Image (cartoon, rainbow, N blue to C red):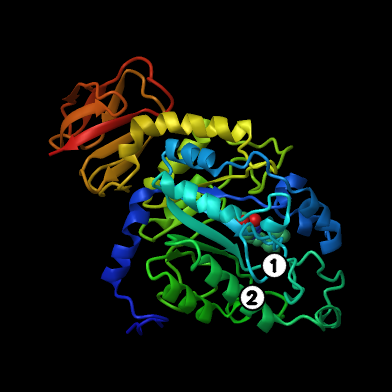
Amino acid sequence: SVSAQKMIGSETDAQKDQRMEWWKDSRFGMFIHWGLYSGAARHEWVKHNEKIDNEGYQKYFDQFNPDYFDPNKWAKSAKAAGMRYAVLTTKHHEGFCLFDSKYTDYKAPNTKAKRDLVREYVNAFRAQGLKVGFYYSLLDWHHPDYTIDEIHPQSPADKSDASYAKLNKNRDMAKYRQYMRNQITELLTNYGKIDVLWLDFSFPRSDGHGKGKDEWGSVELLKLIRKLQPGIIVDNRLNLEEYKDGADFETPEQVSTAELAKYRGKTWETCQTFSGSWGYYRDENTWKTHRQLLDLLITSVSNGGNLILNVGPTARGEFDYRATNALDSLAHWMHANDQSIYNCTFAPDTYKVPEGTKLTYNKKTKKLYVQLFDYPKGKLILPGYAGKIKYAQFLNDHSELLYKPTGSDDLEVTMPAKPPYEIPVIELSLN
Ligand code: H79
């Protein structure tokens, strides 16, 4: 027989379902990666990629001056796009804190911004009725006690134990663990109710030059988090896979839509970028199209998961025009079709997926939605749907779609010659 999985706390399945309900119903969130790397404007891993030390990175701290920072604009843009929650990098791997921490000088209040930017973010997003989340990097490439490991910018070229030992002689992870507990306590105490905590990430290695649950003190950290914010939802990157309650959701990062089917039945959120990097990357020319972004959103929901779509604001603190345009297009689509996203999941097995479409099913209204990826020529066949539906209409304008049986078990929907816009949605009322 299968033995009970280990537990850290004592929450029941029913209690967890209740805690996760808003999150599962929301389906669409905004990730925001903003930090000193936004000024370098060539990837949030620039410090690692170019092996820059603290001294070499100091220019980005000195230059940081977000004169256009207005989180009310960010929040309005997220809300308009149909996003229901947001997660902001309070500290990324570079170690720079957007919040006013007592435990470091490496923070926004000590830059030209001269203030706690996290507080303004929290207030603005809450004011729009959005749930508020914090990203906090477990990695810290600035802290003097954080040991040099395999993926640290100053990782030794020869990878020998002796080289690591020499570099780490004055570094003490116990002190860094305390620093993290202190900062997470600040974040989960000083800003009211926080809805999501997104910790990033574990990379355990048998040679000791990675980091996982022992290096982070993950069990103790999670207990602290749950004590400070009992309702909070925590990602799965603390390396606590052996515990049933060591994580609330899986986090497939930048995976293809084809891979998302594998997560059906789990609790998950795929995190995705507009252009490849998370931090603002001026010269990146790999921006996803409107259709690709919709595909990510719909494919996530049609497999029972969430999409958290990332924006990398510029060093001046605003969304650049490419991000703004993409969000505006999503806003139009969501205005017309958000009932096929919120409260939705994959369709019951009795409904076959018509060719060139994806299905979502609204758990609250019990309506079935057909997302038309390949617009049908003249007619759409609903395979095996005879006797199963009682009305069909476009969701965007509630215009009736006529249908008839084909003689077999199928139904044939008569379609207008042209789609009203990209990826229209048919709403089916079920018998
Ligand atoms: O914050 C965003 C990213 O910066 C961060 N997570 C999202 C949400 C992230 N980026 N990469 N990773 C997490 C996974 C790390 C991958 C690695 Fe590697 C593979 C680290 C070491 C091997 C890529 C290749 C980076 C260095 C070499």
Quadrant holding ligand 1?
Answer: bottom right
Q: Which residue appears at 38% of the width and 16% of the height?
A: 418
In depth, the one of 169 and 305 nearer the eye is: 169
- The N terminus sits in image quarter: bottom left
Amino acid tagged 2: Tyr
> What residue is rendered at 36% in x and 24% in y?
376
Q: Residue 334, image x and y in percent?
A: 39, 34
Residue holding disc 2: 179
The alpha-carbon separation of the residues under discs 2 and 1 comes to 11 Å
Left or right of 406? Residue 270 is: right
**Among numbered discs 2 and 1, the one appearing first in the sequence:** 1
| Residue 243 locus on image (x, y percent) | 44, 78
Q: What's the residue type where badge 1 is placed?
A: Asp
Q: From what the image shows, is residue 273 above or below residue 238?
A: above
- The residue lying at 41 percent from left, 39 percent from top is 82
Indicate left or right for 392 with 378 as reference: left
> What x and y, as percent, mark residue 292?
52, 36
Tell me which corner region of the image, top left, top right, bottom left or bottom right, holds residue 14: bottom left
Can you name the residue that lies furthest to the front here? 114
Q: Are marks 2 and 1 in contact (CB under 8 Å)?
A: yes
Looking at the image, can residue 212 be seen?
yes
User: Residue 398 versus residue 351: which sits nearer the camera?
Assistant: 398
Q: Which mark is residue 140?
A: 1
> What is the residue that sits farthest to the top in this orientation?
417
Q: Residues within 10 Å of mark 1 (few under 14, many from 20)?
A: many
